Structure formats: C-alpha cells, structure tokens
Amino acid sequence: MAHVKLHIPGPVEVSPKIYEAMSRPMIGHRGQGFKDLYAGLQPRLQTLLGTRQLVYLSTSSAWGVMEGALRNLTTKKVLNCMCGAFSDKWFDVAKRCGKQAEALQVPWGSPIRAEAIEARLATGQFDSLTLIHNETSTGTMSPLDEIAALKRRYPDVMFIVDAVSSMTAIPHRFDDLGVDVLLAGTQKAFALPPGLTVFTASPAALAKAATVSDRGYYFDFVEFEKNAREHMTPSTPAISLVYGLAAKVEEFFSEGLEARYARHRHTNQMLRDWGTRHGLTLFPDAGFESVTLCCFNNGAKPGAGRTVDAAKLQKLMKDRGILIDGGYGKIKGTTFRISNMGDETPETIQSLIGALDESMKSL
Ligand SMILES: *Cc1c(COP(=O)(O)O)cnc(C)c1O
C-alpha cells in the first residue's frame, strides 16, 4: 500500500529511525535492562517537563491518564474547563467516573481565561480542575501561565493539565507552574506511535491520591511513583515504545530543545502565511492560536475568509500522498486542520505547501 504521509494532528508521521529503534529485542520489564533504559531516560524527561518529580510512563493513550487523574484526585467536585472536543469530553468522562463535575464552557475557538476559572473556584466547591493547554480540535492554546498562577490562591485544588499536543513543541515548566498533573500522549508532538503517555504528578497530588480509596489500579498514581523510584512501571509497559521514546528523546536533545521549539513556531508560521496568501482565516481567537497545528475556517462561517471545499481539498491532498484533517467534532465541515508537529522541518512544510498550492488550483 502506498504510504500516505500524516499531516493530521495526531497520530503524526513517525520516522524510520524510530521504527528501527522499536524493533530491538524484547527484555524483561523487571530486569536490569529495562531499569537502565528507564533510568537513562528519566533525567531528560524531567528536563523536558521542567520538573524534579519523577516522570511516569503509562501504557495507554492520553485518555487513560486523563481518566486516571480524576479517579486519583477528585473527591469533591471537578471543574472541567471546556473549549473544544477534547476538553468537553473530559466533563463527560468525569461524570462516567461518577464524579461531581461542573462545566466551565466557553465557545469553541476561545481560550480558557484565569478570570473565569477564579470566579468558579471562589465558590469553594471544587477540589480539582481539568484544563487542556492546546485544544487540538480547534487549534486554540489557553494561557497556561495565567491559569497556573491561580494555584497559589487555591493550593488545595488539584490542577490537572493536558499538554498532549504541546509537550516537546512548547517549553513546559511543571515545577515553576506549580500545577499538579501534566500529561501527554506520544502520538502527537513526540512523533512516536500511539500507546504511551508520559506524565508527572506534584507531591501534593501524590499525597492526595494516597488518601483516595477508589483510585483503581492501572492508573494508580501512588503505584506509578513507587515503581518509578525503582525505574519500573506498575504493570508491563509497551517496551518497544519505550525504546522508541529513548531514541526520540535523544534526538530532542541533539537538536536542542530551544531549536525544537523555534522550529515549531517557524513551521507553524509558514502554514499561517500559506493560509493568508489564499485568503483563509484561522478558527481560534486572535492571539490564542496553536503553534503545533493550524485550524483554518473553510468559509462556511459568514465573513470568515475564502470558501474552500475542505472535503475536496482533503481528497486532492490524499491523491498526492498527504493526509490533512477535515475538521473534528462539531466543526467538521466548517474547518480543516493541518499539523506541523513532530519532525516537520521548513523543508518538509515547504513541500507540503507546494502540494497544497497545487491542490487549491483544482478547487
Ligand atoms: C489527541 C488528544 C487527546 C486524546 O488522546 P488519545 O491518545 O486519543 O487518548 C487528548 N487531548 C488532546 C489535547 C489531544 O490532542
């Protein structure tokens, strides 16, 4: 089957080098080989997340830890900050876990602001909140610094932050922010196959989890901490993915983290400029656009730029061996998304733009 290159916002393209690293022979997960592998990775993962806490490896997609965080940390009521498909879903997941939950909904494309959160936290009803840093469905980034600053005034509220589509593309400083959980799945900006989630938890989160009796087993934060101290995971991890992660993290540091962040800003700007040249506008509110993907309006919304048949564009691009996304959730059909996260360089984005330009001629 001909390879179709992924420019959807996850999973993203995985390099041959990573597949090669992942094909190393299997080892036992309680043996020295695995312990050395995880121990070798740990300091770099800590640098990447900006933390001195241990970084855990969960064999699950992000939702495993997103659900797990609620089971570990919500005993009173969770405030779900909602601005798109993934953040809206977290509210639904909280209710499915039997948690008391309240929706803090803003229109899709708008960011979550600290002021709105503060007004709810001031009621004293909440012991936790969920926030998605980069809402991938709408291409909108919420101001994490401003929101995390609230933690000082509400130290007992557990701040659970999803950085699924921003981690490794944007600097994260977990300890400085003072939030309680930070997590990301590997199939987004890490440019690894899906199946692994990297996360960390604050001392306060670990202390709280230890008091919660129905936190389950598979995503028990206390188990993750206990095992990570011995360079292990609670249950058998996806060892092949950990091989891939080790190779990938090696790449991050040989490129340099600052260079990696700058590369994402640059390639994202190239895509924005491409859109501007074609009279397209971005879906998110100005000033809150993601740097790991562009979510373009296709003109279905009045006054929102040029009209583009996104389904046709997607088809034309696929014929050229490239997959872009035709919109997600309730904005499918009125937006389309193109990802620049992971390994993409100015050269690969330039060739993507070449294919987009050619495809636009046939629209
Ligand atoms: C992709 C994504 C998720 C869901 O990840 P899964 O791997 O499907 O569990 C959650 N949050 C954000 C922001 C995402 O982009």
Image (spheres, rainbow, N blue to C red):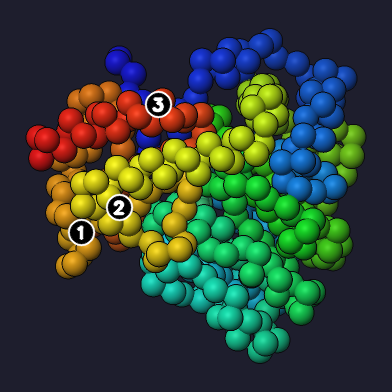
Q: Badges 3 and 2: C-beta atoms under 8 Å apart?
A: no
Which residue corresponds to the image point at 77% horizontal and 41% vertical from the top-left? 47
Residue 40 x %, y %: 82, 26
Tell which circle, 3 or 1, labels the residue nearer the N-terminal end. 1
Q: Three-letter amino acid code at disc 3? A: Thr
Q: Three-letter amino acid code at disc 1? A: Gly
Query: Eyeballing the image, is 73 above or below 196?
Result: below
Q: Which residue of the protein is positioned furthest toward the left in this rendering?
A: 362
Which residue corresponds to the image point at 52% horizontal and 55% vertical from the top-left? 134
Does residue 236 appear to the left or right of 279 in the view shown?
right
Query: Eyeballing the image, is 16 above or below 183?
Result: above
Residue 247 x %, y %: 66, 21
- Image mark for residue 348: 3
Q: CA distance from mark 3 to mark 1?
A: 26 Å
Neighbor class of circle 1 (other Cα within 10 Å; few <14, some 14-19, many 20+) is some
Q: Is mark 1 within 8 Å of ligand 1?
A: no
Residue that badge 2 annotates = 296
Q: CA distance from mark 1 to mark 2?
A: 9 Å
Neighbor class of circle 3 (other Cα within 10 Å; few <14, some 14-19, many 20+) is few
Which residue corresponds to the image point at 84% horizontal and 29% vertical from the top-left? 39
Does residue 179 appear to the left or right of 170 in the view shown?
right
Q: Badges 3 and 1: C-beta atoms under 8 Å apart?
A: no
Please, what secondary structure does the residue beneath circle 3 have?
Answer: helix
Residue 359 x %, y %: 17, 33
Q: Which residue of the protein is positioned furthest toward the bottom in this rendering?
A: 123
Tell which circle, 3 or 2, labels the residue nearer the N-terminal end. 2
Please, what secondary structure does the residue beneath circle 2 have?
Answer: strand
Which of 59/359 is in front? Answer: 359
Residue that badge 1 annotates = 305
Q: Is residue 39 visible?
A: yes
